Amino acid sequence: MRNQTNILKEHYIRLAKKTAAWLGLVALASTTLVASPAQALQITNRSVVVGSSANGASTTYDIKFNPGTTGTIRAIKFQICTSPLELTSCTASNSSSFLTNTASFTAGTGTTAPFTSNWAEGTAGLVPTATSYWITYATGDSISSGSNYTVRISNVENPNADNTSYYVRIYTYSDAAATTQVDFGAMALSTARQMTVSANVQESLVFCVGTTGTDCTGGGLTGNTLNIGTGGDNVLSTSTPSGNISKMAADTNATTGYVIQYITTSPGGTGGVACPGSFSSSNDCITDFGGTAGTFSAGVSNFGINLRNNATPDVGVDISGSGSGGSIVALQYR
């Protein structure tokens, strides 16, 4: 039979075991909390558009993202690291990714609202380093997880070797001192060898004449006979102006265009007398109509280049095409 002393001894032994078990659970819970702190929400739809992927280039970074949390933020930190992991220390891809004197945030240029005003490069300890760059706004702006935003940072230096993988991290904060984190996200990038494409384009000029068609492509203008008389017998009239049209066209890739000239210095005239500056044959001269617009008259012979649709005589068409080389020749004889 157990006495009172043994009963009390067994009771305290059981109590001590329970206490030890509770202390063990508390220690386990505390260890778990220390090892796994609460994580920020993930930033989504995140990307970086770089102005140049060349190694060592000083270029722009357009950092695009959807915040994980809808709410007011007052600071954003950007990092360039060799690892994308939030809890891993940030090691620079090279020593000068963010330079204190060169990296800059330009509100409004490549940047979208609400970061287009009030936001500026961080101050009061949040100055650029080789790995980190902050933008802050003491009052803050509300951003939505359903919207995509862009922040442009200029004069960021790429890693200085080809085909180098690296990462851009984004941290958002609810306070301008960047102590209370809200969201986090990271994006992978890589430098690349730059390709240079070169080619030579030869200058070309194609000139064609004819009576039918629109330009010199596909065989060009066709037709080589120009009847300027009237009626089926093609007889000239001294009472009614008559004429016809021929066409000339030019195709070229010359940046300065082209000039079409016609030559009228062949000898001719009655008795073999030369008449330079005129349209001539061996025994006659047809004078140049001149550069002033006018009306052809019956009984007076003239020739010229008609550059538009005229009413008297009813010949010619306006210049067509992207150039200024479509020209119409109008001839009239007495």
Image (cartoon, rainbow, N blue to C red):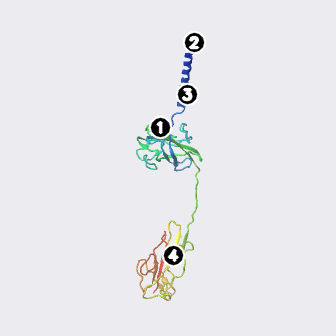
Three-letter amino acid code of the residue under disc 1: Gln
Q: Which residue position holds label 3?
A: 28
User: What's the CA distance linking mark 2 and mark 3?
Assistant: 34 Å
| Res. 67 mark | none
**Residue 304 image offset from top left, x and y in percent:** 46, 79
**Dot 3 crowding, Cα within 10 Å, few <14, some 14–19, many 20+:** few
Of labels 1 and 3, earlier in sequence is 3
Q: Which residue position holds label 4?
A: 248
- CB atoms of marks 1 and 4 within 8 Å: no
Disc nearest the viewer among 2 and 3: 2
Up the image or down, 282 lies above or below 11; here it is below
| Res. 181 mark | 1
Three-letter amino acid code of the residue under disc 3: Leu
> In front here: 65 or 204?
65
User: What's the CA distance linking mark 1 and mark 3?
Assistant: 27 Å
> In front here: 41 or 246?
41
Disc nearest the viewer among 4 and 3: 3
Identify the secondary structure beneath mark 3: helix
User: What's the CA distance linking mark 1 and mark 4?
Assistant: 74 Å
Up the image or down, 285 lies above or below 184; here it is below
Q: Which residue position holds label 2?
A: 6
View extreme (front): residue: 1
> In front here: 264 or 210?
210
**Dot 4 crowding, Cα within 10 Å, few <14, some 14–19, many 20+:** many
